[in-house]
Image: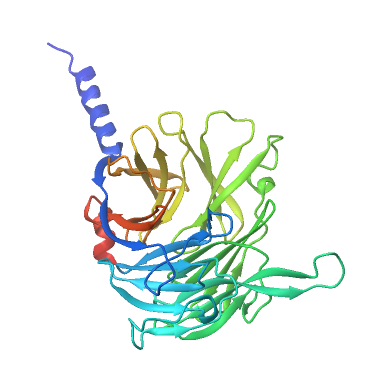
């Protein structure tokens, strides 16, 4: 009589591996609209004309299918449909030429000192990081720039500004990231190798201020040099995902530490080997379902590779759920710079800056696999 045990065991192992294997998808980029580089009200200016270089304090946000673009040079925030129609403008008059009156009453004035970044909340409030200048006594530099977060409603009306302690609080020294969540907005700050996280309600009340996050917190017993390169949060704001690298490592791997902000305890870590052994991953963000997205750019294939991890309900570990290859056009035209943005419904969009224009695009990641569930639940 034949022995079926090895065969049954093999089948069981194959079934288990199939169940655990991440689903893989490939998507082509969809180019939506192009904006000319210039100073007109429906144009953007990303260059320092004196030094002929790109200014990096520009970017965009994708929210509810609309593109919000901030332009530091001209001190303005523009809202566009995904067809490229300009819908609203918030701008600094002294930095712009007289308007062409394209928008009628959908234009609001506000004096920005130096606009650095923006985000849009779940309630369509705009959070804008701007400079404020503080007079300090002594030293060679008596006036130093610090940052506040100006808050505008969906109609472009200024409401208040946020500082460290909430509405009208003391300014921040440097703001690395703004992260809206269901409770309000999180602010991640950085000074040298020390990071802090502040959580604010939708009305500006300070809900949480983290302890100092530094390399010693991640691995107090190691003598290796660790650098924190980025921090992102879960959608509920309770978990911080800390992207770290080891100075002595030559593997280009990323180590993601998982920090519970409620008790300031490291819950675990995930090591991500470099894509095809060469290109390191970094954190893109999280979606409504608390899943975490990591990305790397494959220069050989001219594509982004996305890995999506979901939190385990039984432990603090992250489990890889899906992988997506985001292909770029093979037209031989390389942008000067590109940015990716992850919307909370799982949509991934990009801004590609060229010498004379900027192209805005997306990949319909909301229509595949479990990401489609996020769009339905949004």
Q: Is residue 15 left or right of residue 55?
A: left
Question: What is the x, y in percent for residue 171?
Answer: 67, 73
In the figure, residue 246 lies in which quadrant?
top right
Residue depicted at 40% across the width and 84% down the height = 107
In the image as oriented, which residue stretches furthest toward the right?
138
Colouring scheme applied when the structure was drawn: rainbow
Identify the residue at image location x=41%, y=45%. 295
- Quick check: 75 left or right of 135? left
Depth order, front residue of 204/276: 276
- In the rendered image, residue 367, in percent from the top left (x then y), is placed at 22, 55
Q: Is residue 37 above or below residue 92?
A: above
Q: Which quarter of the picture shows residue 62?
A: bottom left
Q: Residue furthest top?
A: 1
Q: Which quarter of the rendering shows the C terminus? A: bottom left
- Tell me: residue 287, above or below residue 254: below
Identify the residue at image location x=64%, y=63%: 174
Quadrant where the N terminus is found in the figure: top left
Instruction: Name the one closer to the observer, 154 or 358.
Output: 358
Residue 159 placement (x, y as % from top left): 51, 85
Answer above or below: position of 362 versus 302. Answer: below
Seen at 34% across and 63% down, the residue is 35
Q: Taking the image as drawn, is residue 151 in sight?
A: yes
């Amino acid at each position: 009589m034949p022995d079926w045990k090895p065969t049954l065991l093999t089948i069981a192992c194959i079934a288990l591996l199939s169940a655990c294997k991440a689903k893989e998808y490939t998507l082509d980029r969809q180019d939506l609209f192009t904006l000319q580089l210039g100073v007109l009200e429906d144009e953007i200016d990303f260059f320092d004309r004196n030094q002929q270089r790109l200014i990096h304090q520009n970017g965009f946000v994708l929210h509810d299918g609309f593109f919000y673009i901030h332009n530091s040079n001209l001190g303005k925030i523009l809202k566009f449909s995904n067809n490229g129609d300009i819908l609203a403008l918030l701008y600094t008059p002294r930095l712009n030429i007289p308007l062409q009156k394209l928008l009628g009453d959908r234009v609001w004035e506000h004096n920005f000192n130096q606009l650095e970044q923006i985000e849009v909340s779940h309630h369509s409030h705009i959070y804008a990081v701007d400079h404020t200048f503080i007079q300090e006594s002594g030293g060679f530099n008596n006036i130093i720039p610090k940052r506040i977060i100006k808050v505008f409603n969906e109609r472009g009306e200024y409401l208040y500004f946020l500082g460290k302690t909430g509405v009208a609080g003391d300014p921040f020294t440097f703001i690395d990231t703004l992260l809206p969540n269901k409770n309000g907005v999180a602010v991640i700050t950085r000074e040298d190798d020390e990071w802090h996280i502040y959580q604010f309600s939708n009305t500006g009340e300070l809900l949480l201020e983290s302890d100092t996050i530094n390399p010693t917190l991640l691995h107090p017993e190691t003598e290796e040099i660790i650098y924190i390169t980025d921090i992102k949060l879960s959608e509920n704001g309770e978990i911080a995902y800390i992207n770290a690298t080891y100075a002595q490592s030559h593997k280009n791997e990323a180590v993601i530490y998982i920090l519970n902000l409620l008790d300031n305890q490291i819950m675990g870590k995930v090591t991500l080997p470099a894509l095809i052994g060469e290109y390191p991953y970094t954190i893109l963000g999280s979606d409504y379902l608390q899943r975490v997205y990591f990305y790397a750019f494959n220069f050989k294939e001219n594509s982004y590779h996305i890995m999506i991890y979901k939190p385990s309900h039984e432990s603090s570990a992250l489990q890889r759920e899906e992988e997506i290859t985001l292909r770029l056009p093979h037209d031989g035209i390389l942008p000067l710079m590109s940015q990716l943005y992850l919307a909370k419904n799982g949509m991934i969009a990009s801004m590609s800056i060229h010498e004379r224009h900027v192209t805005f695009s997306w990949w319909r990641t909301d229509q595949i696999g479990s990401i489609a569930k996020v769009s339905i639940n949004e």
